[in-house]
Image (spheres, rainbow, N blue to C red):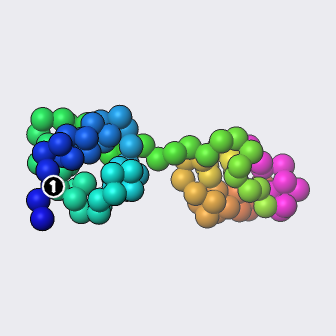
Amino acid sequence: MATPSADRDSILATLLTGKSQTQTAALHGVTRSTVERVVRHHRADHPILSAKKPNRVPPPGSIPIPSWVRRADLVSDYADVARLSDEFDAARHCRRLLEESRA
């Protein structure tokens, strides 16, 4: 079943406000594949539809800091790396700093 043009226009308008494809699908009561079809059809006219959304930066204080990092006084190093990458990279970085300080 084809999506009526009015629905396509309203889906496009919602996408152009910055809503994700999943949010748009839920808002209009259609499947995500329907929204993806609208995006593919209008991508050339609206380049913002093909732009990747930036990753959300977690607000300060929302990154859980392990107790061993607090004891080693590496909280700011851990938080900086975790904000840019993830907690695993941050832990790896802090362990490397601890090894270097002990050597």
Residue at 25% across, 54% down:
35
Please say if 56 is above or below 32.
above
Q: Main secondary structure of the magenta part?
A: helix
Q: Residue at x 74, y 45 (%)?
A: 61
Residue 66, position in %: x, y?
79, 61
Q: Residue at x 65, y 42 (%)?
A: 59
Range drawn in magenta? 67-77
What secondary structure is marked by label 1?
loop
Question: Against 57, is 21 above or below?
Answer: below
Query: Can residue 72 be spotted in the picture?
Result: no
Which sits in the foreground, 78 or 42? 42
- Whether residue 89 appears in this view of the structure is yes
Residue position for label 1: 3
Seen from the viewer's position, the closer of residues 66 and 94 is 66
Could you tell whether 9 is left or right of 29 in the image?
A: left
Tag 1: residue type?
Answer: Thr
Q: Quadrant of residue 45?
A: top left
Where residue 14 sits in the image (x, y, percent)?
32, 40
- Which x, y percent locates residue 55? 47, 47
